[in-house]
Image (cartoon, rainbow, N blue to C red):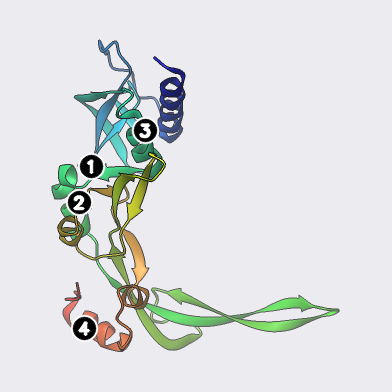
């Protein structure tokens, strides 16, 4: 085993162990002699590989993962790629497609309302009143401005490629609201958190739609309880 491989192996083990939260899960007997990672599956059905011999682990994304009988041996060919996958918290889309769809189908868009509030900020020898703006789910919140938006959920896809220096790097997609679009675009991985919240107005700007009236989408959601936009 050469020094570079040893260093990468140590880095992977440390990065994986960093994700493991303290718990009272018992260790499972393992007869595999070579360095390896085990497949773990979350209660939501998401699969990922982790360096652990415990029956389950708690991770920073708040999912609990249980060990399966599947594993991968670590070698000089896959160590760098697995390290990157671990550090970025990625999971394979095709291996997890049904769980991803189930998670996404359980999410729902909702309307948010802008409100204003004031605070005193020190300026020189005195204070000035500064107006702030924030968002709330409460349609009866005090200080509402009348401006509305929608919180929606988006996916980001990732691919792993080698750069000009021969090092693995991640290539990230733009936001989409349908995982099938990521598959059609050729993306292989997704973050283990699966989706992120985003204001619908921000999403529309990011995908190049500038001539929209957010009130139209708010009214659609109020009337249909589900956005048809993709």
SS for callout 2:
helix
Query: Would you say the residues marked 3 and 2 are in contact, meaning their CB atoms lie under 8 Å apart?
Result: no
> Label 1: which residue?
46
Residue 132 lies, in percent from the top left, at 58, 79
Mark nearer the N terminus (4 vs 2): 2
Quarter of the image with the N terminus is: top left
Residue at image location 49% in from the left, 82% down from the top: 115
Residue that label 2 marks: 100
Cα–Cα span, label 4 and label 2: 26 Å
Give the residue at the far front of this rendering.
Answer: 164
Mark 4 vs 3: CB contact within 8 A = no
Residue 15: x percent and y percent? 44, 33
Decide: few, some or many residues near mark 1? Use Cα within 10 Å; few <14, some 14-19, many ≥20.
Answer: many
The quarter of the rendered structure image containing the C terminus is: bottom left
> Do the CB atoms of the residues marked 1 and 2 lie less than 8 Å apart?
yes
Q: Give the image quarter of residue 9.
A: top left
Q: Is residue 47 left or right of residue 151?
A: left
Q: Are marks 4 and 2 in contact (CB under 8 Å)?
A: no
Q: Which residue is mark 3?
A: 80
- In which quadrant of the rendered view does residue 200 lie? bottom left
Query: Would you call the spot at circle 3 few (<14 residues within 10 Å), some (14-19), or many (20 or more)?
Result: many
């Amino acid at each position: 085993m050469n020094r570079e491989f040893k260093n990468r192996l140590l880095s992977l083990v440390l990065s994986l162990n960093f994700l493991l939260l303290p718990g009272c899960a018992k260790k499972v007997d393992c007869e595999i002699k070579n360095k390896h990672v085990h497949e773990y599956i979350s209660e939501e059905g998401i699969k990922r590989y982790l360096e652990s011999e415990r029956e389950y682990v708690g991770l920073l994304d708040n999912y609990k993962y249980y060990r399966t009988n599947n594993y991968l041996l670590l070698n000089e060919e896959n160590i760098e790629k697995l390290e990157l996958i671990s550090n970025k918290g990625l999971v394979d889309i095709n291996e997890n497609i049904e769980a991803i769809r189930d998670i996404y189908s359980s999410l729902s868009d909702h309307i948010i309302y802008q409100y204003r509030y004031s605070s005193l900020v020190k300026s020189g020898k005195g204070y000035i009143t500064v107006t702030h703006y924030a968002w709330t789910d409460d349609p009866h919140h005090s200080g509402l401005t009348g401006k509305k938006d929608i919180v929606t959920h988006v996916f980001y896809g990732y691919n792993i490629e080698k750069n000009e220096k021969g090092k693995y790097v991640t290539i990230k997609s733009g936001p989409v609201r349908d995982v099938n679009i990521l598959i059609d675009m050729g993306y292989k991985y997704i973050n283990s958190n699966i989706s992120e919240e985003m204001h619908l107005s921000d999403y529309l700007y990011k995908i190049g739609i500038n001539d929209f009236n957010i009130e139209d989408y708010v009214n659609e959601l109020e009337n249909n309880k589900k956005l048809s936009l993709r």
